[in-house]
Amino acid sequence: MTELTLGRLLRSSTTGYVFGCKIPEAAAPCFGDFVKAPAQRGQTEVIGLVYDLAISDDGFVRPMATADLPEEVILDQRNNRNVPIEVSVLAVGYKNGAGFVHGLPPQPPLTLDTIRTCTDDEVRAFTERSDYLRLIAESAEAPAEELLAVAVQRAAAVRSPAERERFLRQTGRELARLFSRDLPRLERVLRRINPYH
């Protein structure tokens, strides 16, 4: 995947951020996508995982919801209104001049900063070590089990078949360590990573 511009930051903290973007298109963010936002005046990029997408209504939409509308009115509403999708992101690390760090960033991104997708190379490099999994597993905001599974699937998908097998074994060992005292939760996460086994 090449780097795509997704939207602009609405609010942030060290544990995550929320950005707004237009009505969903093929390139719109999806649950579990790896994204990045600049911080510290461009010295770092906060790496995060999309964990929630919310489409808000406004005073104009509410009465339209029960009306029998022609398709062109619906398309006009979707394409021309300025009600953004709010996308919530869990911070799982950051990139600085020394490389990737798996932990909370020193500072959050600033309002109206541009949010972009991570490239396949960035996802591969960031997920080479499994330390980011702990931040997902311990998240109180995000649906941790679902997000863990999708993040691992996305990280595996950007690897060659031989790399993918090694990556999944390494990730499985880290998940077993993280959930060593909660085997039912470990089983649920592993089943979500590979639902066909």
Image: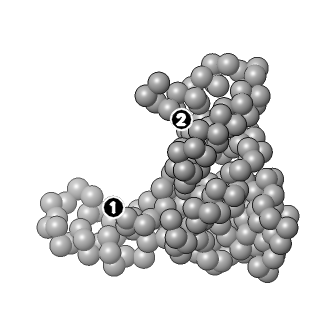
Amino acid type shown at disc 2: Ile
Q: Write down the quadrant of residue 121 in the picture.
A: bottom right
The answer to whether one can see residue 56 in this image is: no
Give how far across and how far down residue 99 sits, in percent. Answer: 80, 65
Q: Which mark is residue 62?
A: 1
Instruction: Tell whether label 1 touches label 2 (CB within 8 Å).
Output: no
Amino acid type shown at disc 1: Arg
Number of other residues with Cα within 10 Å of mark 1, as a class: few under 14, some 14 to 19, many 20 or more = few
Badge 2 is on which residue? 193
Give how far across and how far down residue 165 sits, in percent. Answer: 59, 38
Give how far across and how far down residue 108 sits, in percent. Answer: 77, 67
Give how far across and how far down residue 59 sits, in percent. Answer: 38, 68
Q: Residue at x 53, y 45 (%)?
A: 161
Number of other residues with Cα within 10 Å of mark 2, as a class: few under 14, some 14 to 19, many 20 or more = many
Of labels 2 and 1, the one closer to you:
2
56 left or right of 147? left
Task: Report how far apart the C-alphas of labels 2 and 1 lie in the structure.
Answer: 38 Å
Front position in the image: 142 or 137: 137
Mark 2: which secondary structure? helix
Q: Which mark is residue 77?
A: none
Q: Residue at x 57, y 26 (%)?
A: 188
